[in-house]
Image (cartoon, grey):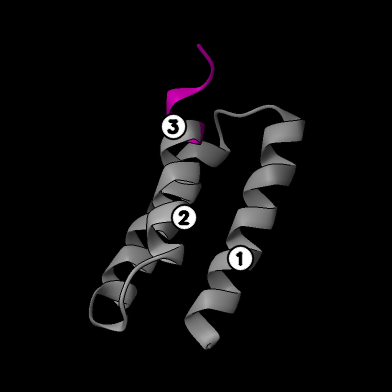
Amino acid sequence: MGNRLFQEARQAVEVAKYANSKDLDGLVDKAKNAISSAYSNTTTAEQSQLAALQKELDQIHTQ
């Protein structure tokens, strides 16, 4: 089944990636919160993936 919080964080980033500009800030904030919530309950490999997702969010938000 996997880590539910990790899966939610990945899904939140995917939603933010395809959001229109009107909703982007709120969805990026939601995704960042999901990443933060998931981080402490993940394996080292998942933490590495969450860091990559965070970088993706940073790139989305600065475009």
Residue 4 horizontal/vertical position (percent) = 43, 24
Mark 2 to mark 1: distance in Å? 8 Å
Residue matched to label 3: 5
Nearest to viewer (mark 1 / mark 3): 1
Q: Callout 3 environment at 10 Å: few (<14), some (14 to 19), or many (20+)?
A: some
Label disc, if present, on residue 25 of the rendered structure: none
Nearest to viewer (mark 2 / mark 3): 2
Mark 2 in CB contact with mark 1 (< 8 angstroms): yes
Mark 2 in CB contact with mark 3 (< 8 angstroms): no
Mark 1 in CB contact with mark 3 (< 8 angstroms): no
Asked whether, in this view, residue 53 is left or right of residue 17, the answer is: right
Residue 38 horizontal/vertical position (percent) = 49, 38
**Residue 45 sits in quarter:** top right
Residue stretch in magenta: 1-6
Residue matched to label 2: 13
Residue matched to label 1: 56
